[in-house]
Amino acid sequence: MKIHLSNSIWIGNIDPFINSFDTSNDKLLEITSHKKWVSVHPVVLCMITGLGLFIRRKQAELSVEKMEATSKHYFERMGFFKILGIDSGIKIKSHESAGRFIPLQLITNSQNLDDFICEMIPMLHLNPEQAEPIKYIVSELVRNVFEHASSPDGAIVCAQYYKKSNTIRIGVVDTGVGIKHTLERFYHPKDDLNALALALTPGITGTTMRIGGTEANAGAGLFFIKSLAKISRDFFMIYSGKAMYKLLKNPKNKQIKLISDPLKDHFSSETNLPFWKGTVVAIDLCLNDTLNFNELLDLIRKVYREGRKQQTKLRYKKPQFI
Amino acid sequence: MEIKLYECVGTFAENKDIAKEIRINKIIPSLESGEEVTLDFEKVKSATQSFVHALISDVIRKNGIKILDKVYFKNCNDTIKKIIEIVMEYMQNHS
């Protein structure tokens, strides 16, 4: 297997990065990178870490080419080499990470998650209103991993705050069973993209056929998170199996309306990507005044109500008069 | 019975395992013995929909919507009120 980090990989241009992933030899994973500058979304760090851990578990060989790019210190500081037990030879002056980023973390249980949520907000130096949606996103995504993914390494998480654009970028990745497998029992999705669309639809969960879920799952978490990205006119991406669904940025002059059917949103998709065993989720969230969490909840309540009515209607069996 | 959630979950109510514990060990036994239950969100600043769902959805599903006459939500801020309303609404549509 080979994966190359080009000089710029963000949600908007992540497709070629994923497409270039060569999965042909599963006895070896080679990670190479651009020689001058590598600038990546946190989700990319989570993905290559997940792959590295996966390869180690398979007792295959992991080869990370010595980084030459000026930005190599970023990978060291984010904990990429440390998690994989690689001596990068990169020397950095250690300093407080507060105010900028959350290094790579493996979150494997509920207590880890509680601790992580407590620690992460001071690390990003955000005020309580800004912190609200971020805590929400991390909690829901990581609990999804615990409940559905059967991921041996738990959830791989990291985040970065970008002061200039006042944006937080978050990645949550697992190497578990993937979304299609999770939904197979009750929904029989025809392919990976269909599985992603189901997972993003309010009221649908892998734990039951019943609309509205079980006592533990309502099937609303991913819909809430996609809605946060939509309201803040930012990217949201989910990739599992061979498919990727990407919510595209909504233009500033266009009024935002939440829609329960993800395939009616402004999105792009891929259906023949290299197979990702597990799930990759990335979100960008601009923390400006337009992101009002309470207003979002009002909109979600409305659309959740409409979406669930549609789901119920679809399942409604009419009497067959003959 | 009055349940002070801050003591169990802190300022951010997101841990569904704790929600389940509260539901099974406190809410359901109290309601079954005919007591009213007050869920006090004082000092809790936010909650996830998943937490509120894990806390009360099964109570409604098993006992029907009338059980809500015996459940009170106290000291909720606007965000928590909205999340509770979302959960209540979809549970009432499908209970």
Image (cartoon, coloured by chain):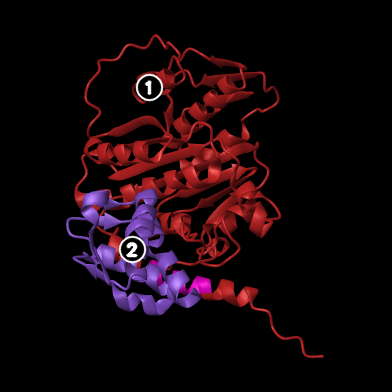
Q: Give how far across and how far down residue A246 sits, in percent.
A: 52, 50
Asked if one can make out residue B4 in the rendered structure from this viewpoint, the answer is: yes
Give the residue pinned by disc 1. A71
Left or right, residue A5 beside residue A191: left
What residue do we see at 51% from left, 37% from top?
A174
Q: Look at the numbered disc 2 and give the secondary structure of its residue.
A: helix
Question: Which residue is at the far top?
Answer: A89
Q: In which quarter of the image is the C terminus of chain A?
A: bottom right
Chain B on-screen colour: purple
- Callout 1: residue from which chain? A
Q: Disc 2 marks which amino acid?
A: Ile
Q: Disc 1 marks which amino acid?
A: Ser
Do circles 2 and 1 both sit on a common chain? no
From the image, state whether disc 2 or disc 1 is nearer to you.
Answer: 2
Q: Look at the numbered disc 1 and give the secondary structure of its residue.
A: loop
| Magenta stretch secondary structure, dominant | helix
Question: Which one is nearer the viewer's eye here, A242 or A50?
Answer: A50
Asked if one can make out residue A232 in the rendered structure from this viewpoint, the answer is: no
Q: Give how far across and how far down residue A203 sits, in percent.
A: 51, 64
Question: Are discs 2 and 1 less than 8 Å apart at CB?
Answer: no
Report the label total.
2
Left or right, residue A208 beside residue B86: right
Q: Give how far across and how far down residue A49 sits, in percent.
A: 49, 27
Give the residue pinned by disc 2. B27
Residue numbers of the magenta segment: A300-308
Chain A on-screen colour: red
Q: Within 10 Å of the Cα at label 1, are there few (<14), some (14-19), or many (20+) other Cα atoms?
A: some
- Callout 2: residue from which chain? B
Q: Distance between the residues labelled 2 and 1?
A: 53 Å
> Is A204 above or below relative to A268?
below
